[in-house]
Amino acid sequence: MKRFLLLLVLLNSLLINACSSTAKNPEDGTGQALSHDRRTREAILIDKDIETEAYSELNSDDDLRNQCHYTVTAYNGATLVTGEVPNEELRKKVISIIQEIPNVRLIHDNLIIAYPSDADSRANDELITDTVKTALNQIRTTPDFDPSMVKIITENGTVYLMGLVHRDEGTVVINVARLQPGIKQIVTVFEYID
């Protein structure tokens, strides 16, 4: 019973956060984000365009939309592709589509050959992401660090960390993330600025 109540409280918290932090227009979300983001305003908008175009192109292909699960995350032009595809042919197709998108300067291909993950696995990934975000909010030992500078993507228990960070910040983030439960692996996709 305690587990059920804890799950309800957590779900309620997630829903409240999702409703309060989602920007409908890319321009709307830049005010707060820009004050803590090390990317330029132009880079933030380019990254949003990369993600939007990637999903539009990928979802327009029936085979990809119906047989695959993919997540595309752009940060400063570096584009992380995670998820599951049933075969190598479809993996190559996903990557070739993303390679054609303007302003993609680097692709981190972390697609795996497997059946698409189920709803339980994806819910667990969301829980891990939220746990890591909460833990990063507790960092007080690194001057000028703001946890919103780090993008956290979780896929099948693997946590991907993206952002423009100093090496000492990256080390602290990795060490804090490593302590969180349920994580199978941590993959850093940081761009170091020192």
Image: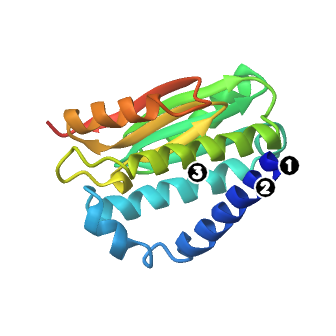
Contact (Cβ within 8 Å) of mark 1 with mark 3: no
- 112 left or right of 118 in image: left
Q: Nearer the viewer, residue 161 or 145?
A: 145
Q: Amino acid at mark 2?
A: Leu
Q: Amino acid at mark 3?
A: Ala
Label located before the other in sequence (2 or 3): 2
Q: Residues within 10 Å of mark 2 (few under 14, many from 20)?
A: few
Q: Residues within 10 Å of mark 1 (few under 14, many from 20)?
A: few
Real-space CA distance between mark 1 and mark 3, rounded to the nearest whole angstrom: 42 Å
What color scheme is it?
rainbow
- SS class of the residue under badge 2? helix
Q: Residue at 36% x, 67% y: name it.
A: 33
Mark carried by residue 1 = 1
Q: Residues within 10 Å of mark 3 (few under 14, many from 20)?
A: many
Q: Position of residue 159 (x, y in %)?
A: 53, 33
Label located before the other in sequence (1 or 3): 1
Residue at the extreme left: 194
Real-space CA distance between mark 1 and mark 2, rounded to the nearest whole angstrom: 6 Å
Contact (Cβ within 8 Å) of mark 1 with mark 2: yes
Quadrant containing the C terminus in the rendered view = top left
Q: Residue at 30% x, 55% y: name it.
A: 146
Q: Position of residue 118 (x, y in %)?
A: 82, 38
Q: Nearer the viewer, residue 117 or 100?
A: 117
Circle 3 residue: 54
Q: Residue at 48% x, 27% y: name it.
A: 186
Circle 2 residue: 5
Q: Amino acid at mark 1?
A: Met
- The image quarter containing residue 72 is top right
- The image quarter containing residue 43 is bottom left
